[in-house]
Amino acid sequence: MTGMSSLAAVSRLSHLARRPRRAGVLPGFGLSMGLTVGYLSLLVLVPLSTLFVKSMELSWSDFLAVVTEPRVVASYKLSFGASLMAALINLVFGVILAWVLMRYRFPGRRFIDGLIDLPFALPTAVAGIALAGLFAPNGWLGAPLERWFGLKVAFTPAGVVVALIFIGLPFVVRTVQPVLEDLEREFEEAAASLGADRWQTLRRVILPAITPAILTGFALAFARGVGEYGSVVFIAGNMPMVSEITPLLIVSKLEQYDYAAAAAIATVMMGISFVLLLAINGLQAWQARVSGRPA
């Protein structure tokens, strides 16, 4: 009887193996992959490759002279430094804001949740003008800050950080929110029942679960900050060696019809951004692998 049952099971498996697979919604892998690669090539790879082609019009010595000019190096430091600082600030307060919106119910919650997306919908130039007026020496916030604390925000590097915080906050909040929504409270209750205090629960239960999402939000906010232009130029002051960002310097080169120099600066900026994002994604994948979750 056992032999007959085994034979029937084998026959059933053989029948299932011979049965043709159902066609998916999309065409086969070859066609879908070809469309994907072609689409990405037209929108991403081909435009970016033109930077290398255009920058190759310069000799190696001229290329180094352009990208290592003191004014250009100062703009690198401001763009990447301000983007990093703004992303770190958004990382902390974005997670707190996402936690409050997901775990508490209070009047005006939906209104605040809707305001998070305002930087997505607001034109960057409008945001820059609004922030410049708000933090100007005679602005609603700029005047008290300068009078009481001696802090100048508008037309300084601090203004660049403020603008990047404004446009980068939604990336962190919207990335962490779905993970917090899917995080079951039973895990926290189980940790509490086992004697864990709030700090231990946060450190050993909550943070490991949301760390990949936090790193993703940080990377998105950082990448957006590095390439931001419209909301920064109005509040930065755009003083060379002080508050001039790299995208503005690239635009200045283009206005001077120095396309090769603009492409060279953009190539260096793209390379640094790629390395930093690759490191962040590698850290995210490592953390997910350590925690046993899919990257």
Image: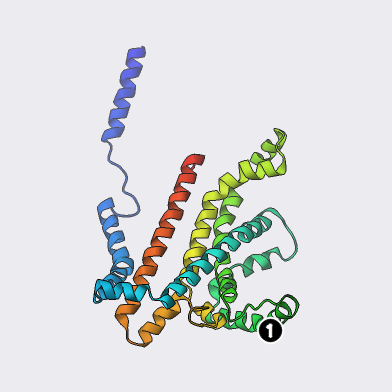
In percent of width and height, residue 255 lies at 37, 87
* Residue under the point 73% across and 75% down: 149
Instruction: Depth check: give the residue in front, 164 or 192.
Output: 164
* Residue under the point 62% across and 57% down: 95
Instruction: Depth check: give the residue in front, 107 or 222.
Output: 222
Residue 55 visible to the viewer = no
* Residue under the point 33% across and 69% down: 43
Q: Which amino acid does label 1 sit on?
A: Gly
| Residue farthest top in this picture | 1
In percent of width and height, residue 229 lies at 48, 77
Instruction: Name the side, left or right, on which 144 lies relative to 45.
Output: right
The scheme the figure's colours follow is: rainbow
Residue 166's image quarter? bottom right
Instruction: Name the side, left or right, on which 143 lies relative to 20.
Output: right
In the picture, the quarter occupied by the N terminus is: top left
Q: Mark 1 points at which residue?
A: 139
Vertical relation: 51 (above or below) 100? below
Count of number-bearing discs? 1
In percent of width and height, residue 94 lies at 61, 60
Vertical relation: 234 (above or below) 180? below
Instruction: Depth check: give the residue in front, 292 or 264.
Output: 264
* Residue under the point 49% across and 42% down: 293
Residue 149 visible to the viewer = yes
In percent of width and height, residue 10 lies at 31, 23
Helix, strand or loop status at disc 1: loop
Crowd class of label 1 (few under 14; some 14 to 19; many from 20; radius 10 Å)? some
